[in-house]
């Protein structure tokens, strides 16, 4: 409760957003008069298009983490970022953890022009849904959008200075999971991803609203075809089970059916690939959702239900637990979850405030090494640690996707709507572990297409196995590698000679990539 | 098949009866962990809630056709793409044609209107309830894991194998399952010279180190299997997709005597809310993958199916009425397929509740057979484990009589 009192109540604007983009009530009444609206004599005026809300910077209290500076810097660089880059730990320690967090919680204030310049090489990131749905042109241009999507994710995770916002974007992409293998989800995922990014540290109601209006989501969970004459419950169920309340959050099967009716007519405009409310397909009867009377009110009904779900107590604790599981440990303490859940409620779903509360907690400060890196995270952390250069092409995306797939994470292709799991055992099959070791060996050996590594700067002037391992330990693991592991790698580097004797240049060139691979294969690098 | 004489079938008389019924010879055996004498269990989970009303079609029900004007499968003989008659009331989806001979030779049994006693229509809850083996509860171990444990099997590397990118929860237990994506990629990166170094790096006791230790132990056997390659017997052809490849891997592990007692293989893509299709389309393609793979396995195993039991299940069936999206929403009652030489096949088991409005469970086929009734009988009779109360806590078994034993 301590954090909650400091935060006070947030300046929630959920209610306002709820009514900002709805179709005017008059339109709803007008349409209700029609018995069979499929062939109206005069088409009704088109409702206004969906305009995503503008994120507003959070006003956060001054908080101080109880942790020690060295540990907190590693947590900032590995848990709240995609891994160490040369110089990054020094920067964080110089700034101080609290200031670094404050910087990262206001991503719009961070100049990210270098990453943006790289992103400009990936055309899909600059295009509209309509352009991305123009498959003829894309074919003529010989473009593969799946490769562009993976490349964009890699470039952002590796190069963006808004690291915490990227970590959170991945969280929301998992939370509002979309499998690009389904229907038209791939071309529409770019917009969905970007809106998750824009609001990654914004308000939950905005994230939820964007997702409900997301053409990719409308395809993925079939709400596109949800209509009065035969409702489709897919989205209605998952928005409560997976996006807001949680499976034990207090809804019934009847609520699923009612929410499905509420979202009838929420669909995608085939011409533009943008959201469209089709009043003719909307069920204009009245509904009851979680005890609230809804409608009739056209698209406003859905906004009202989104308001109810976003503000629900179960949503606060469900999202709090998921965020703690992502950012702290596989099994966060109930006390932390309760505290964070209270911040969620008091701030009316201000994610920056919620994340701030989590990362300033004592549990977070004591959590270094408690999270397994998921495959994509490992791939990016490896690239960052080696300060590799990327050549953006289909080859790069294909290589990273294939590696992640072998480790158990086919990127943006999680089929069930849960999104990829967030706990270590789910990722640790024997095959996946071998694939992790294979990836880091290939990376250090320069055998990943599109990724160029230069290992020499990692070891500086060191020439003996012991000195080389000490340098690598410092550069890649902040000096945390256990003695037995250091010895084992040094002994392997040394071969038949003593680990205190210098290696010849030829031997070093041959063995250094494998030694670096071993460093990255260590459990110490697999976790964060 | 190596060392086929190492083990003798425990219930030779009963097996002989089964063999006589379905053409399998008893007495052939695989090297199993410890003194295990039961069948190798292969559990296939259809993830997403398979539409079992279109897989095993109740073609005599007029309500089936009335509720599914677009996606229904026609009654046998009435059209192209019609159901394949099983018993005068039910018919198989036409894409499951390769399963029909196994039903006819009594190797394949079907249980309809089967499912969980918990009413949840959530994929994830229901998959958990079924895999943990107790509707409404979640454990840290699954029904197969508890079965292996109460059988007293040693915690050998290959006792329980989970195929795919994640280990199935049903296998969780005191005998750590081995998670395998494929035999092909199962090798030590950088070569065997790195293995001792890696063993030092992974000398800890946490979950990473445990998985690593298991992985190191499996490498020698996997190297042998990979280098040997695999040629299925009897002209069997596994489909060239991941489900087919994974099942072929399981077949190879059985034949190569790695000591397999139970394996899990998943087939996803059954969540057909939208554009499900009927005799052709998304669902039909998935049915073909399932049927062609099971056919390949049974063909490949030949008479050794006498010591294998395959159980196919899903978290729930789907709504009777098709939606305007030409698909079906989450439902209740599903179906289970049981394939093996020790199975009294050729019959659709279970109590058919009918599809009249009054018989439906909120618009869905009702569940009349608890999935544990089917699994429990297999555990008892085919896997030789009487500890049903520990495998399925709180459950009392009343077998349907679909297995010999």
Image (spheres, coloured by chain):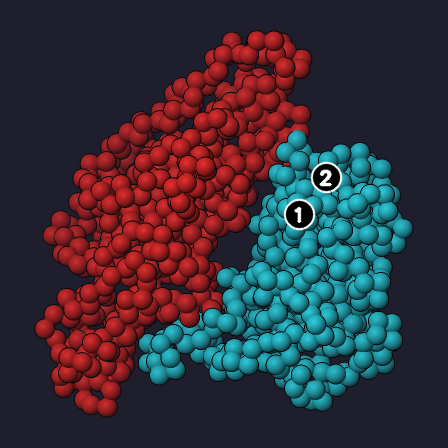
Chain colours: A red, B cyan
Which chain letter goes with mark 1?
B
Determine whether the residue tagged by mark 1 lies in a helix, strand or loop: helix
Residues at marks 2 and 1, CA–CA distance in whole angstroms: 10 Å
Residue assigned mark 1: B283
Say which of A183 and A105 sits in front: A183
Considering only vertical position in the picture, is B205 above or below A499? above
Q: Residue at x 59, y 76 (%)?
A: B230
Q: Quadrant of the N terminus of chain B?
A: bottom right
In the image, taking residue B203 as reference, residue A247 lies left or right, namely right
Q: Position of residue B172 (x, y in %)?
A: 56, 66
State yes or no: discs 2 and 1 in contact (Cβ < 8 Å).
yes
Residue extending farthest right: B88
Which chain letter goes with mark 2?
B
Say which of A124 and A77 sits in front: A124
The answer to whether residue A185 shows anywhere in this view is yes
Considering only vertical position in the picture, is B228 above or below B327? below
Labels 2 and 1 within one chain: yes
Q: Residue at x 47, y 17 (%)?
A: A47
The answer to whether residue A257 shows anywhere in this view is no
Q: Residue at x 39, y 39 (%)?
A: A190
Considering only vertical position in the picture, is A299 above or below A385? above
Determine whether the residue tagged by mark 2 lies in a helix, strand or loop: loop
Say which of B125 and B340 sits in front: B340
Sequence-wise, the earlier of marks 2 and 1 is 2
In the image, taking residue A235 as reference, residue A315 lies left or right, namely left
Q: Quadrant of the C terminus of chain B?
A: bottom right
């Amino acid at each position: 409760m301590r954090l909650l009192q400091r935060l006070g109540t947030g300046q929630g604007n959920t209610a306002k957003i709820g009514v900002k983009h709805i179709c005017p009530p008059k339109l709803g009444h007008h349409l209700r008069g029609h018995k069979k609206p499929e062939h109206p004599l005069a088409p009704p005026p088109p409702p206004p298009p969906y305009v995503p809300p503008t994120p507003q910077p959070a006003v956060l209290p001054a908080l101080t983490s109880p942790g020690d500076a060295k540990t907190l810097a590693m947590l900032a660089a590995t848990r709240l970022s995609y891994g160490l880059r040369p110089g990054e730990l020094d920067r964080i320690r110089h700034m101080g953890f609290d200031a670094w967090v404050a910087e990262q919680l206001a991503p719009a204030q961070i100049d990210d022009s270098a990453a943006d310049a790289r992103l400009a090489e990936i055309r899909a990131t600059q295009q509209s849904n309509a352009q991305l749905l123009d498959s003829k042109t894309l074919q003529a241009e010989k473009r593969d959008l799946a490769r562009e999507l993976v490349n964009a994710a890699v470039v952002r995770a590796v190069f963006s200075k808004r690291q915490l916002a990227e970590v959170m974007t991945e969280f929301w992409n998992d939370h509002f999971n979309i499998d690009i293998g389904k229907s038209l989800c791939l071309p529409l995922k770019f917009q969905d991803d970007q809106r998750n990014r824009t609001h990654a540290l914004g308000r939950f109601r905005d994230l939820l609203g964007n997702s409900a209006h997301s053409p990719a989501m409308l395809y993925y969970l079939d709400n596109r075809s949800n209509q009065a004459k035969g409702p489709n419950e897919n989205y209605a169920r998952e928005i409560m089970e997976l996006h807001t309340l949680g499976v034990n959050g207090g809804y019934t099967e009847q609520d699923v059916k009612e929410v499905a009716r509420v979202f009838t007519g929420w669909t995608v405009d085939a011409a533009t690939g943008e959201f469209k409310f089709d009043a003719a397909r909307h069920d204009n009867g009245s509904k009851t959702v979680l005890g609230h009377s809804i409608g009739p009110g056209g698209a406003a009904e859905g906004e009202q239900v989104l308001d109810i779900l976003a503000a629900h107590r179960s949503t606060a604790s469900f999202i709090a637990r998921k965020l703690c599981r992502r950012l702290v440990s596989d099994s966060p303490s109930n006390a932390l979850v309760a505290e964070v859940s209270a911040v969620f409620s008091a701030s009316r779903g201000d994610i920056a405030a919620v994340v701030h509360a989590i990362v300033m907690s004592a549990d977070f400060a004591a959590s270094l090494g408690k999270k397994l890196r998921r495959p994509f995270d490992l791939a990016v952390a490896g690239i960052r640690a080696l300060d590799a250069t990327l050549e953006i092409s289909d080859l790069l995306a294909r290589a990273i996707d294939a590696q992640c797939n072998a480790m158990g994470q086919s990127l943006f292709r999680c089929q069930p709507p849960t999104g990829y799991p967030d706990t270590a055992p789910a990722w640790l099959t024997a095959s996946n572990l071998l694939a992790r070791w294979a990836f880091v060996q290939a990376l250090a050996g320069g055998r990943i297409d599109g990724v160029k590594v230069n290992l020499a700067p990692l070891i500086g002037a060191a020439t003996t196995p012991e000195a080389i391992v000490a340098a690598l330990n410092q550069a890649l693991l902040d000096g945390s590698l256990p003695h037995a592991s250091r010895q084992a790698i040094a002994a392997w580097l040394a071969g038949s000679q003593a680990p205190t004797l210098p290696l010849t240049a030829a031997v070093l060139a041959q063995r250094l990539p494998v030694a670096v691979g071993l460093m990255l294969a260590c459990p110490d690098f697999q976790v964060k | 098949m190596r060392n086929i004489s190492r083990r003798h079938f425990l219930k030779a008389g009963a097996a002989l009866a089964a063999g006589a019924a379905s053409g399998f010879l008893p007495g052939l055996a695989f090297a199993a962990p410890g003194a295990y004498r039961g069948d190798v269990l292969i559990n296939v989970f259809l993830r997403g809630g398979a539409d079992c009303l279109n897989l095993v079609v109740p073609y005599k029900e007029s309500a089936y056709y009335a509720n599914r004007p677009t996606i229904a499968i026609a009654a046998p003989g009435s059209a192209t793409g019609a159901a394949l008659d099983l018993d005068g009331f039910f018919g198989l989806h036409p894409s499951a044609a390769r399963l029909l001979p196994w039903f006819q030779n009594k190797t394949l049994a079907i249980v309809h209107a089967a499912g969980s006693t918990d009413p949840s229509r959530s994929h994830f809850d229901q998959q958990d309830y079924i895999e943990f083996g107790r509707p409404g509860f979640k454990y840290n171990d699954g029904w197969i894991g508890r079965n292996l444990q109460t059988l007293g099997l040693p915690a050998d590397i290959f006792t329980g194998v989970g195929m795919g990118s994640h280990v199935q929860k049903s296998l969780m237990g005191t005998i750590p399952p081995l998670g395998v994506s494929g035999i092909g990629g199962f090798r030590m990166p950088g070569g065997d010279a790195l293995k001792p170094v890696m063993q030092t790096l992974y000398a800890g006791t946490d979950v990473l180190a445990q998985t690593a230790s298991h992985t190191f132990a499996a490498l020698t056997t996997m190297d042998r299997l990979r280098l040997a390659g695999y040629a299925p017997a009897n002209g069997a052809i596994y489909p060239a997709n991941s489900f087919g490849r994974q099942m072929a891997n399981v077949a190879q592990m059985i034949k190569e005597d790695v000591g397999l007692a139970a394996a899990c293989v998943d087939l996803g893509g059954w969540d057909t809310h939208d554009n499900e299709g009927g005799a052709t389309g998304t669902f039909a393609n998935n049915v073909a993958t399932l049927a062609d793979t099971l056919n390949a396995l049974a063909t490949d195993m030949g008479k050794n199916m006498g010591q294998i039991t395959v159980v196919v299940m899903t978290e729930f069936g789907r709504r009777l009425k098709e939606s305007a999206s030409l698909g079906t929403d989450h439902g209740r009652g599903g179906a289970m397929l049981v394939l093996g030489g020790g199975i009294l096949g050729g019959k659709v088991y279970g109590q058919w509740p009918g599809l009249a409005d009054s018989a439906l469970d909120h618009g869905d086929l009702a569940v009349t057979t608890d999935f544990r009734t089917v699994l429990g009988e297999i555990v008892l009779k085919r896997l030789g484990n009487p500890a049903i109360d520990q495998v399925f806590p709180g459950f009392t078994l009343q077998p349907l009589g679909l297995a010999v034993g």
